[in-house]
Amino acid sequence: MSLSLKLYRLATSLAAPALPWWLNRRAAIGKEIPARLPERHGIPSRPRPDGKLIWVHAASLGETMSALPLIASLARHTGVLLTTGTVTSAQLAAERAAAIHQFVPLDVPRAVNRFLDHWRPDAAIFLESELWPNLLTALDARGTPRFLFNARLSPRSAARWRRFPRAIRQIFGGFTMIAAQSPRDATRLRGLGLRDIESWGNLKFATPDLPDDEAARAALAKACPGPWLLAASTHAGEDIPVIEAHRALRVLHPSITTIIVPRHPHRADAVASLARGVPLARRSRGELPVPGGLYLADTIGELGIFYRLCPLAFIGGTLVPIGGHNMIEAAQLGCATIVGPHYENQFEAMTTLHSVGALVDVADFMELEATLIRLMSNTAHLAAMGSAGKRICEGFADLPDRLARRVLEAMP
């Protein structure tokens, strides 16, 4: 074991006595589920099922969404254990994952060993970039094959890893297979001296479609004839440009209805105060929009309705320096997308969708308004953009099955 990994193991062991206090603090602010805190210490809340068991670890909500189709593929052949690290991902796992769910144990030797001694996985899959050294080395000690799928490595992380070449060999070199989510990530991983890095594509393109509510969608369509425009996951500083664009669009399309979905619903009052003379209805109050008005969707979990209703969506977090939000969800449902210049957290999705003509990027607020006017006046072009996005997503449909097959073939 490299010196850096030995020091890490020692540091985590020394920190272990303080971790219950830390977990209780997190539970007090809603970041842990109190009744399930023992799982974080490696104490199981469920029995291990008989037979083969594959362990999948997905750090948070986004990774868990990506894992769902992979888990479904694996579950047709073997038992699956899913670990996550957040409350929201645990809720998603309970609702949609064909797997036993546990919270991931803290990366301290005692918790790790307790966890692995109970579950005894026959293979382990890690998604994206959350790699816990004690967990990984403990798997190696047990001879458990491990895989890194949808692997992602930022330039900053790559620079940090290069400072520990021996740890790189042990942590990354121990994977049976590393499948990068993009050619850029594969190149960065190879830059660490790793070989046999494969770029299989991003599992996020294969995630299940967002859920729909046909009755709710029909009620909206009945209330307003359209056209419809969506501003999804907006942040402070983006609502005013969207509302001003709506005012300009009403000149050409008097019955246009623009749906604004704040990324954080608690901003609803602030967004509503910006309407200034434009009719505004709030979904949280059970109101319906009127033609030519704004519809403030200050609720959670309903984007699937709106992406199906609207031919075009502006994706928030891109006009202000947030880094962007999920653009693939819109493309999967045939909704054309437009983004601002700050999409660094969604770079691969953005470039993929842009390359097939499913997405348009703009430089600033003024270009956003001009582009919205141009696109909303060309329904045929919007339909073509939406179809292109849907096609590119459908091209990834078999990715979970192909990855699952590689794991199943490598199992002892």
Image (cartoon, rainbow, N blue to C red):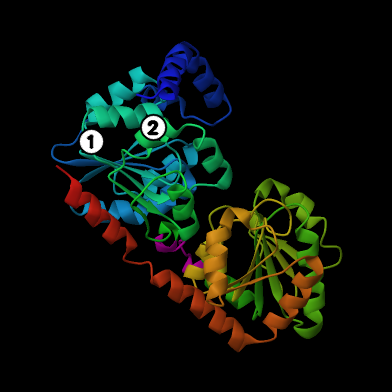
- Crowd around label 1: few <14 · some 14–19 · many ≥20 (10 Å): many
Is 214 magenta? The answer is yes
**Residue 75: mark in rendering:** none
Q: Is residue 208 left or right of residue 22?
A: left
2 vs 1, front mark: 1
Disc 1 target residue: 144
Observer-nearest of 156 and 110: 156
Q: Is residue 341 visible?
A: yes
Q: Amino acid at mark 2?
A: Val
Q: Is residue 258 left or right of residue 97?
A: right
| Magenta portion: prevailing SS class | loop
Give the magenta-colored segment's residue range.
Answer: 205-215
Image coordinates for residue 149, horizontal then vertical, percent: 37, 50
Picture residue at 51% right of the left edge, 69% below the top: 331
Picture residue at 56% right of the left edge, 79% below the top: 385
Picture residue at 42% right of the left edge, 21% below the top: 3
Q: Vertical placement of 140 versus 338: above or below?
A: above
Disc 2 target residue: 104
Q: Amino acid at mark 1?
A: Thr
Observer-nearest of 141 and 335: 141
